Image (cartoon, rainbow, N blue to C red):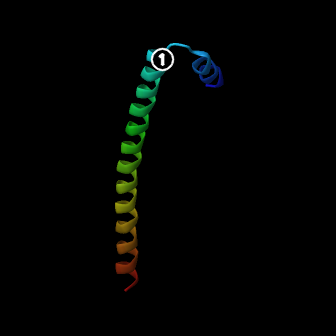
Amino acid sequence: MVKFLKKLGRDDSGATAVEYGLIVALIFLAMIGAVNSFAGTTIAMWNTISTTIVTATV
């Protein structure tokens, strides 16, 4: 990863740098979408567990 960033820093081609920036932005957006989906599923799971425990103790 460090080698890639050093190579990117030495790159004189503007078009290539823009392309790399777009690729990084798309990867970032995909990661945000995955984390958001995972978070929603996890919250629903913990809510179900909490409700089940409260119901069982009453």
Rendered-image quadrant of the C terminus: bottom left
Residue at (65% x, 25% y) in the render = 2
Q: Work out which residue is located at the far bottom of the displayed protein and give it.
A: 58
Q: Between residue 24 and residue 45, name the one nearer to us.
A: 24
From the viewer's perspective, tell me whether residue 44 is left or right of residue 13.
Answer: left
Expressed as whole percent of the image width and height from the top left, the position of residue 11 reads 57, 15
Expressed as whole percent of the image width and height from the top left, the position of residue 24 reads 45, 30
Total count of labels: 1
Expressed as whole percent of the image width and height from the top left, the position of residue 49 reads 39, 68
Please name the residue that numbered disc 1 is placed on. 14
47 is higher (above) or lower (below) than 56: above
Local secondary structure at mark 1: helix
From the viewer's perspective, tell me whether residue 13 is left or right of residue 57.
Answer: right
Rendered-image quadrant of the N terminus: top right
Expressed as whole percent of the image width and height from the top left, the position of residue 23 reads 42, 26
Residue at (36% x, 43% y) in the render = 33
Residue at (55% x, 13% y) in the render = 12
| Amino acid type at mark 1 | Gly
Q: Between residue 28 and residue 12, name the one nearer to us.
A: 12
- The answer to which quarter of the image holds residue 41 is bottom left
Q: Between residue 22 and residue 46, name the one nearer to us.
A: 22
From the viewer's perspective, tell me whether residue 5 is left or right of residue 17.
Answer: right
Residue at (40% x, 75% y) in the render = 53
Q: Between residue 38 and residue 19, name the one nearer to us.
A: 19
Answer few, some or many: residues within 10 Å of disc 1's Cα (few below 14, many 20 plus, some between 14 and 19). Answer: few
39 is higher (above) or lower (below) than 5: below
